[in-house]
Image (cartoon, grey):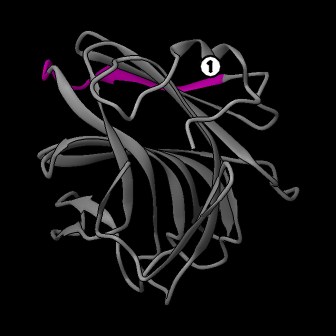
Amino acid sequence: MRWMNEPAKWKQDGEDVKITSPPEVDFWRNTLHGFIKDDAPFYWMYVNNDFEARLSFKGKFTTLYEQAGLMIRVDEENWIKLGIIYYRDQLHVSCVFTRKNSDWSTYRLPKKKIDWLHVWVKRTEEMVECFYSLDNENWIRIRQGYFTDAPRMRVGMMCAAPESESVKVTFSNFLIKGGRDDEDFVDDKRLARPSDSLL
């Protein structure tokens, strides 16, 4: 795997990757706020054509817009991030489709403490479906939309703290099915075995 905007503090411990984001970083383009941010940590690998990816993560999100999740990225103008965000004093599932400008959807999570959040993306030709789960078994679709016909893209984990000093996140259970591109990939049957991970 490779880094974009590698943070000063991160480590891999078995199947877990622990990342501390730098201060005031994010991925966002134009909409409402009129600025472009493309400086948050993103730990990724290449995929080709149709694929599925899953990721689990946890952290303490207590300041506005602190976030973490899975990212699919073609370039600085075309990307998706799916995960969790702290917004209006509550945790939300967050999904941003960006094609030159960012398009944001949220769904408020229960007020009870959230331990791990699990996300799943499925790309079929130009379309991407986005799902989340609180138990890694029952999946809810939060978004379906047109993304791109680009054959090659990057997929991995990201976190950001746009209005705070940092956020600490633990990522685990990063799984890929299909889309092999290079030596980063292992047997795609692992997606059917949730205990296994690419990390």
Q: Left or right of 31: which side holds 187?
A: right
Q: Nearer the viewer, residue 53 or 187?
A: 187
Describe the element under mark 1 as helix, strand or loop: helix
Res. 196 in view: yes
Q: Residue furthest front?
A: 183
Q: Is residue 149 magenta?
A: yes
- Residue 110 at x, y percent in the picture: 80, 49
- Taking the spot 38% from the left edge, 35% from the top edge, the residue there is 184
**For the stretch drawn in magenta, what is the main secondary structure?**
strand
**Residue 3, quarter of the rendered image:** bottom left
Residue hosting label 1? 190
Range of magenta residues = 140-150
Res. 122 in view: no
Q: Nearer the viewer, residue 136 or 1?
A: 1
Q: Amino acid at mark 1?
A: Arg
**Residue 80, quarter of the rendered image:** top left
Does residue 83 sit above or below 151 in this rendering?
below
Does residue 3 sit above or below 118 in this rendering?
below
- Residue 188 at x, y percent in the picture: 51, 15
- Residue 129 at x, y percent in the picture: 44, 20
